[in-house]
């Protein structure tokens, strides 16, 4: 790639210029603030090098919220461009770049990390463990994700963004139609963060299988832990496929191989298949943990045990198996033939059966419960009808013959936003509000939170419901402009208004974080909602000490903490304290990820020597780690007593 | 022995799951290979290049190394550090021989006009074989590192779990090679 020096930084667009100026200003403000308040040491010791699963989880969630903001701004820019016919707010190329980054960021860098963040905070607590199985790996996972995300994000100011859609279909994503570094950013950003995701998957499988406290059998595990286990299994088998697919396309673009090219025997359809063999399970990676979160919240706020627990577990397992068997439904119209389409049509529709089972189980859980309509419960209740709308239209799309009509229209766009926003995004918000006191020691303000909820939920429906009709009217997706005589104006305009209402809802949600930090009452009890059922509420205080449990609890039933409270056994005795073994912090995960990021950045611009140096340094870190003799340390009983006394005050 | 410590047990289970992921990785590469198997675009075909003798030597080297690696773990369980180290060293030599032959093979093919960018078939061939070869090379460096650690610290629960994990990895690469041998070379020579 021959890049002239003045092409390195993207210039010429006032929107991008504005972004550049704000990036510089925010960076200066951050550096200044950290220096002024002497917080560099705190940042390094307490956060960057931390191997505490709760802190890593919080970092994931903060990063995901930032990405939600970025992806949301992308969405609003698109909606402005589509608000009226023949708008000239964005150029065609800029629009392509924005919908590509919107899709990629929302799935890879927002939804998945958000859920992984919640898993990190909650799962070890739910199974009564002191940490995850591989704490260092956990830290490394976060930093590779973060570096990958940042590499992807700088593309729009340095070198130019990818513009071939989040699915990166070839030949669109090939060298001829996507020259320049944009597509390379996509490939390497996803590759680097994918490593982190795979490691997380392995980590959580081992954690859940091996680190459960005494008496916590598999069928006494909370639903969220179950969905995390199954999700981790999907990650472990789906992400290597992504790794290979991205590597093959990288080779095509950088080294002239012919996997997906049109010339010399390459096969573009191979990309579509490989991408969706990963991409479809990915959809379930971001929805199954959401189901887990809703299960936890609904049982807590309906004050009932989960209806049909075993059926729920079974449904999750069946969904996870089917998720690998439906990938062709993403391209029925690409000529696979009637028999193939029928097979995938049937497997796709079969997914609605276990999903339906789950929906009914949630409804039966609420039936005759004493429901308390707090924020987390509102998000969870709103999830059910909205998700069902998305699910039913999904079955419509699953019919291959009918899909020829809807394919590539806004009908599809609306369908997956209904499923992913009502499923995943609602779950992220619900889970964040639900476990917020566990993480930060105070609740989010109820009144402001309800405002955020109603604005977001109504805005969401106003935004996406009209899009079903736009789709049936034939408006194609990925289109950047349309003519007045096509008659799509009014529905598009309504949709744009809805998008802005959603944006307002998000802003109020963020404001609530600030407001509650200043004004909410501090929680002192571990059982912040008063009706906790699972072990994360059994820790000594609102924010659990770094070792989680002074004495590991013993479990005899489902919903163990609920039963402990009924039996009056929730307090721990000081004489049971024993020294606790904990891992020590390390900066190696961060350093390694930075090297990996440098390597990725070099490869984006085909500066191979930088790429090579980065890879070598990364390997050097791995070797160093292998030689490191660090067995962690023991927390003495005195320290535990002191921490616990301090926590209970 | 390798299961003595808590971290050892966790690492071994974690590594088994990692091998599961590696299995998915190589399956994808094989799938790509088989999809592109006849797509030589009129350029040189595998049947014209493959040399059974060379491949048999490589197969022999790698399969034997898996046996010697097993012997090393056996000696480890008998607490015979010296013999274990000898077996590990033999394993490494065999592995190095394999990698050497593979490099020779690649250079030879390139000189005959089959490179990464010749056609889809050769892209898939080189990437599949190259990934396996890279894994073997990483395995060699890894086992050298473990041997140095044992030299320094002796055979502890920690180092022994490392030996065991690296032996799992080594056997796994052997299994992948058997698939390559039959799926790539034997089929390639038939067609």
Image: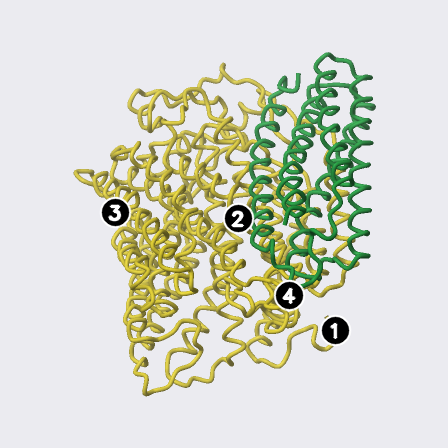
Of the numbered discs 3 and 4, the one sitting upstream in the chain is 4
Dot 3 and dot 4 within a common chain: yes
Residue B56 position, x and y percent, is 74, 36
Q: CA distance from mark 3 to mark 1?
A: 60 Å
Q: Residue furthest left?
A: A368
Q: CA distance from mark 3 to mark 2?
A: 28 Å
Query: In terms of image quadrants, where is residue A467?
Result: bottom left
Return the residue nearer the eye: B151 or A427.
B151
Judged by depth in the image, the label closer to the viewer, 3 or 1, is 1
Which residue position is annotated with label 4?
A264
Return the residue nearer the eye: A548 or B119.
B119
The residue located at (82%, 22%) in the rendering is B86
Give SS at disc 2: helix
Of the numbered discs 2 and 4, the one sitting upstream in the chain is 2
Q: Is residue A627 visible?
A: no
Colour of chain A in the image: yellow
Colour of chain B in the image: green
Give SS at disc 1: loop
Q: CA distance from mark 2 to mark 4?
A: 43 Å
Of the numbered discs 1 and 2, the one sitting upstream in the chain is 1
Q: CA distance from mark 1 to mark 2?
A: 37 Å
The residue located at (57%, 28%) in the rendering is B13
Judged by depth in the image, the label closer to the viewer, 4 or 1, is 4
Quadrant containing the N terminus of chain A is bottom right
Numbered label attached to residue A373: 3
Which residue position is annotated with label 2?
A60
> Is mark 3 in CB contact (under 8 Å) with mark 2?
no
Which residue position is annotated with label 1?
A2
> Is mark 3 in CB contact (under 8 Å) with mark 4?
no
């Amino acid at each position: 790639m021959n890049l002239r020096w003045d092409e390195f930084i993207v210039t010429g667009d006032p929107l991008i210029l504005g972004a550049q100026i704000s990036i510089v200003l925010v960076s200066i403000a951050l550096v200044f603030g950290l220096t002024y308040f002497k917080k560099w040491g705190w940042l390094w010791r307490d956060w960057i090098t931390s191997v505490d699963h709760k802190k890593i989880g919080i970092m994931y969630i903060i990063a995901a919220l930032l990405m939600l903001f970025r992806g949301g701004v992308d969405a609003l820019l698109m909606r402005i461009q589509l608000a009226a016919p023949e708008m000239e707010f964005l150029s065609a190329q800029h629009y392509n770049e924005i919908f590509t980054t919107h899709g990629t960021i929302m799935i890879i860098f927002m939804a998945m990390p958000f859920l992984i963040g919640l898993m990190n905070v909650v799962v070890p607590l739910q199974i009564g463990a002191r940490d995850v199985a591989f704490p260092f790996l956990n830290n490394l996972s976060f930093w590779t994700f973060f570096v990958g995300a940042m590499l992807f994000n700088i593309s729009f100011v340095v070198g130019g963004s990818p513009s071939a859609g989040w699915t990166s279909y070839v030949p669109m994503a090939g060298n001829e139609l996507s020259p320049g570094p944009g597509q390379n950013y996509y490939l390497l950003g996803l590759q680097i963060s994918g490593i982190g995701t795979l490691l997380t998957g392995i980590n959580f499988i081992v954690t859940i299988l091996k680190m459960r406290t005494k008496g916590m059998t598999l069928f006494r595990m909370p639903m969220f832990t179950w969905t995390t286990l199954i999700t981790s299994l999907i990650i472990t088998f789906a992400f290597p496929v992504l790794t290979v697919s991205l590597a093959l396309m990288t080779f095509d673009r950088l080294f002239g191989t012919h996997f997906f090219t049109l010339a010399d025997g390459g096969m573009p359809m191979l990309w579509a298949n490989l991408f969706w063999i990963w991409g479809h399970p990915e959809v379930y990676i971001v929805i199954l943990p959401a189901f887990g979160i809703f299960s936890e919240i609904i049982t807590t706020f309906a004050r009932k045990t989960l209806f049909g627990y075993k059926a729920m577990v079974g449904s999750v397992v069946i969904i996870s198996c089917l998720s690998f068997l439906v990938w062709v439904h993403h391209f029925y119209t690409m000529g696979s033939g009637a028999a193939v389409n029928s097979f995938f049509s049937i497997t796709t529709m079969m997914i609605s059966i276990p999903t339906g089972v789950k929906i009914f189980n949630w409804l039966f859980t609420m039936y005759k419960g004493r429901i308390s309509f707090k924020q987390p419960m509102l998000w969870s209740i709103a999830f059910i009808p909205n998700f069902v709308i998305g699910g039913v239209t999904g079955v419509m799309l699953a019919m291959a013959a009918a899909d020829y009509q809807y394919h590539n229209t806004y009908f599809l766009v609306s369908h997956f936003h209904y499923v992913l926003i009502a499923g995943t995004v609602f779950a992220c918000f619900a889970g964040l509000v639900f476990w917020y006191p566990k993480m930060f020691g105070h609740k989010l303000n109820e009144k402001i939170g309800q405002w955020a909820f109603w604005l977001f939920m109504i805005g969401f429906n106003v935004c996406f419901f009209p899009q079903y009709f736009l789709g049936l009217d034939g408006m194609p997706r990925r289109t950047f402009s349309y003519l007045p005589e096509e008659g799509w104006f009014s529905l598009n305009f309504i949709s744009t208004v809805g998008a802005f209402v959603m944006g307002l809802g998000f802003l109020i949600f963020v404001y609530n974080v600030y407001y509650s930090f200043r004004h909410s009452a501090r929680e002192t009890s571990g059982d912040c909602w008063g009706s906790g059922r699972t072990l994360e509420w059994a820790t000594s205080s609102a924010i659990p000490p770094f070792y989680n449990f002074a004495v590991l609890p013993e479990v005899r039933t489902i919903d163990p903490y609920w039963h402990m409270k009924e039996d009056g056994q929730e307090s721990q005795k000081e004489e049971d304290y024993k020294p606790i073994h904990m891992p020590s912090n390390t900066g190696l995960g961060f350093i390694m990820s930075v090297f990996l990021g440098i390597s990725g950045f070099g490869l984006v611009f085909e500066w191979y020597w930088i790429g090579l140096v980065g890879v070598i340094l990364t390997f050097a870190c791995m070797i160093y780690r292998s030689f490191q003799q660090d067995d962690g340390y023991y927390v003495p009983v005195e320290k535990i007593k002191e921490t616990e006394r301090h926590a209970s005050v | 022995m390798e299961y003595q410590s808590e971290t050892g047990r966790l690492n071994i289970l974690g590594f088994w799951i990692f091998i599961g992921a590696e299995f998915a990785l190589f399956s994808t590469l094989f799938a790509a290979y088989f999809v592109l198997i006849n797509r030589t675009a009129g350029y040189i075909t595998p049947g014209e290049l493959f040399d059974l003798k060379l491949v048999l030597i490589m197969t022999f080297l790698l399969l034997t190394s898996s046996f010697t690696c097993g012997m090393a773990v056996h000696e480890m369980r008998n607490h015979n550090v010296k013999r274990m180290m000898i077996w590990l060293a033999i394993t490494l030599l065999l592995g190095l021989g394999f990698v050497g032959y593979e490099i020779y093979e690649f250079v030879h093919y390139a000189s005959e006009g089959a490179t990464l960018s010749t056609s889809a078939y050769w892209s898939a061939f080189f990437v599949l074989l190259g990934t396996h070869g890279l894994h073997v090379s990483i395995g060699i460096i890894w086992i050298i590192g473990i041997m140095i650690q044992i030299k320094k610290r002796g055979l502890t629960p920690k180092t022994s779990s490392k030996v065991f994990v690296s032996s799992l990895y080594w056997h796994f690469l052997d299994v992948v090679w058997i698939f390559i041998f039959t799926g790539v070379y034997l089929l390639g020579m038939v067609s």
